[in-house]
Image (spheres, rainbow, N blue to C red):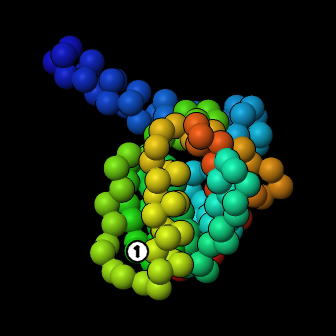
């Protein structure tokens, strides 16, 4: 019975600690504003060289409190595991549908997928807008948006 209680305590901690970090302490990305549980509309993707691509209207991301990221990359819907720790977000391997769209939308989608999954992202929320920055300096700019 003691071993069962230990397992239950560890399971509860593994759920509550990430949620506590995601809710924020008033520091980092959150600054009192959550990142998880919000439908974010992707506005643009800016590469480190300054090249900006504007997102198709359907591009959206939701980082759930359940540890999953879901949304639309610009053409295809996706899901992936997501870990949030303070202002750091790591998105695992994306699983996406395999529809084909216009070349410009597919180019945007590939660039967004690469930026989201190349490593840990730094998140910053400011005035209802979210900026995700990857280790290469690429920026994804998002706004609060209604679900598709």
Residue 39: tell me if it is visible.
yes
Residue 4: image location, x then y, percent: 19, 22
Which residue is more in the foreground, 64 or 139?
139
Residue at (63% x, 48% y) in the render: 138
List the residue tagged with mark 1: 76
Using the image as rendered, state which of residue 19 and residue 62 is in the foreground: 62
Q: In this rendering, would 9 be left or right of 47?
A: left
Indicate the position of residue 144 as horizontal and vertical percent values: 69, 66
Residue 53, quarter of picture: bottom right
Q: Quadrant of residue 1?
A: top left
Is residue 126 or residue 109 the one in the foreground? 109
Residue 66 visible within the image: no
Question: How many numbered callouts?
Answer: 1
Q: Residue at x 65, y 53 (%)?
A: 47
Q: Residue at x 52, y 51 (%)?
A: 115
* Residue 57, horizontal then vertical, whole percent: 61, 80
Secondary structure under tag 1 reads loop
Q: Quadrant of residue 70?
A: bottom left
Residue at the extreme top: 2
| Viewer-proximal residue among 39 and 122 | 122
Q: In the image, is residue 138 above or below residue 86?
A: below
């Amino acid at each position: 019975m003691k071993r069962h209680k230990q397992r239950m305590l560890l399971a509860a901690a593994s759920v509550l600690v990430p949620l506590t970090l995601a809710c924020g302490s008033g520091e980092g990305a959150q600054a009192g504003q959550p990142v998880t549980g919000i439908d974010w509309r992707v506005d643009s993707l800016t590469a480190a060289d300054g090249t900006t691509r504007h997102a198709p209207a359907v591009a959206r991301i939701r980082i759930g409190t359940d540890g999953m990221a879901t949304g639309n990359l610009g053409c295809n819907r996706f899901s992936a595991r997501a870990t949030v720790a303070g202002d750091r977000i790591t998105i695992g391997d994306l699983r996406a549908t395999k529809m084909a769209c216009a070349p410009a939308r597919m180019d945007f989608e590939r660039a967004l997928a690469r930026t989201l999954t190349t490593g840990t992202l730094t998140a910053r929320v400011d005035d209802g807008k979210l900026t995700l920055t990857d280790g290469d300096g690429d920026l994804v700019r998002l706004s609060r948006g209604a679900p598709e």
